[in-house]
């Protein structure tokens, strides 16, 4: 259900909260098939979200019940693609999602072979022919002329169980680059994020934004490491409004 | 369920997300009894949360299922007290909540008579004898010597369907006054908030904090109105750690 405090001024669910439900669906789906985070933790492995794209024709409204369906479209050695479909009552489609996940060794933080888990069992769960009629996320281009928008410092509520900036908070901080007045005139049509690096409590995040087409913006998030002081890109996003 | 992205670095649910579930329980409970927000909207009335106190002995852990029970302890003309009990598996009690609500006229924004709704029907739902063994919220004292901690600007993701700072976000912003290192050493034992005024997109929030006893802090949140420029208190909190 689109809970009241998860809805924005317009009474529609925040994209961050919707994204959270997509990630929950991914977690529950993989857990049910023996590939879940809890199982992987026990064998020194973890899924790492690499890309997420969400494209919506409409957002669920306050109190509305909606369903997130998810399936694995394909899997290579180091990456798997997982798709989503968000539907409302009587199967009306609100939108779709696409995601790319890597599996890492939690000690070395290096990518590991997905097919090494349970003798390539992921193959059993691939649904190659189910349509997901939105574009894959591509490389987001952003030039050196992108405008600096703001700095924010990562706080306690931004940090997940791994001690990293929570995947959902990246989305919220990026969408906060526009204000309520902006969202009064436009809806988010498509949101795309490529997760590049982890960020931690105390890191300063700097946001750069560039208009790349009509109603289309690229955002670059950079962290300044609290100890070393050097700048590292942590994510790139593309946001398309309509 | 304590969802993964709703849990902090320690794997326990964030107090803000738990508070959200308390508010949901209040909403569902009152809706089921004909006093819900949706019904009230139609007759130009709304519940307004005035105070919330949460006292926990333990926080639900990631993936743990928990139950929020709620009941109305009493109702006066302008205020009603609603309590909460949070339990885990086999009825183990995690903690309790207390809240105070006013009913306002959504046009005048003035308090209105709760007993005028449906011929005083709220009386039917009062459970006066059910124990809620935590203190009521009292007036939070904070002196002029409170330390200024930081300013933050209210963003798109902070704003609820009424165009106001979301009740849950008050809690999150206050708890962000302490960092992960602090929470590594302590848990929140009790959190208490008195909502004083609404805040809006673009308002600047200033946070003042004062230690009032061992492990006990008072916080004052003040807004600087984006247009008028004057300062107004928006909430006061007490946070007790152990």
Image: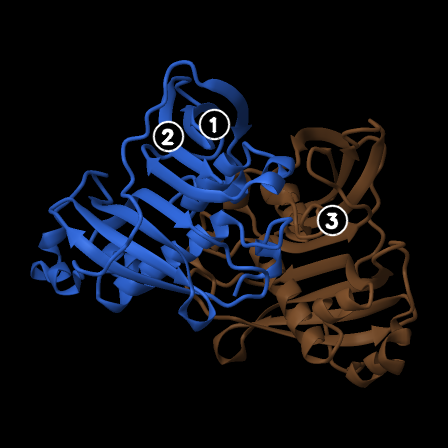
Chain colours: A brown, B blue
Please name whichever residue, A165 or B104, is drawn nearer the observer in this view of the structure: A165
- Are the residues at dot 3 and dot 1 in contact (C-beta closer than 8 Å)? no
| Residue on which disc 2 sits | B234
Number of other residues with Cα within 10 Å of mark 3, as a class: few under 14, some 14 to 19, many 20 or more: many
Q: Are marks 1 and 2 in contact (CB under 8 Å)?
A: yes
Residue at the spot of label 3: A238
Q: Nearer the viewer, residue A146 or A1?
A: A1
Q: In percent of the image, x 83 and y 75: which residue is there?
A: A74
Circle 2 residues within 10 Å: few <14, some 14–19, many ≥20: many
Q: Secondary structure at mark 1?
A: strand
Mark 3 to mark 2 CA distance (whole Å): 35 Å
Which of the two discs, 3 and 1, sits closer to the camera? 1
How far apart in space, not on screen, are marks 1 and 2 (Cα)? 9 Å
**Residue B5, percent across and down?**
61, 56
Mark 1 or mark 2: whose residue is earlier in sequence = 1
Mark 1 falls within which chain?
A: B
**Residue B25 in picture, x, y percent from top left:** 36, 61
Q: Is residue A176 visible?
A: no
Residue at disc 2, secondary structure: strand
Task: Kindly identify the residue that appears in the image at 55 percent across and 38 percent down.
Answer: A179
**Residue wearing tag 1:** B205
Q: Is residue B60 above or below residue B106?
A: below
Residue at the spot 38% in from the left edge and 14% down from the top edge:
B144
Q: Where in the figure is residue B194, as x and y percent of width and height?
A: 33, 36
């Amino acid at each position: 259900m689109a809970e009241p405090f998860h809805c924005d001024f317009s009474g529609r669910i925040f994209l961050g909260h919707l994204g959270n439900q997509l990630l929950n669906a991914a977690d529950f789906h993989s857990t049910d098939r023996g590939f879940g985070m809890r199982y992987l933790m026990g064998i020194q492995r973890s899924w790492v979200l690499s890309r997420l794209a969400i494209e919506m024709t409409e957002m669920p409204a306050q109190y509305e019940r909606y369903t997130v369906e998810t399936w694995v479209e394909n899997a290579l050695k180091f990456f798997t693609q997982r798709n989503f479909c968000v539907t409302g009552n009587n199967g009306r489609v609100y939108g779709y999602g696409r995601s790319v996940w890597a599996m890492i060794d939690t000690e070395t933080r290096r990518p590991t072979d997905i097919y090494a888990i349970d003798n390539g069992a992921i193959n059993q769960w691939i649904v190659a022919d189910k349509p997901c009629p939105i574009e894959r996320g591509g490389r987001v281009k952003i030039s050196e002329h992108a405008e600096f928008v703001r700095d924010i410092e990562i706080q306690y509520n931004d940090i997940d169980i791994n001690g990293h900036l929570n995947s959902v908070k990246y989305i919220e901080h990026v969408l906060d680059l526009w204000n309520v007045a902006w969202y009064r005139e436009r809806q988010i049509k498509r949101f795309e994020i490529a997760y590049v690096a982890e960020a931690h409590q105390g890191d300063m995040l700097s946001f750069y934004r560039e208009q790349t087409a009509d109603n289309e913006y690229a955002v670059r998030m950079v962290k300044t490491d609290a100890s070393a002081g050097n700048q590292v890109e942590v994510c790139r996003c593309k946001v398309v409004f309509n």
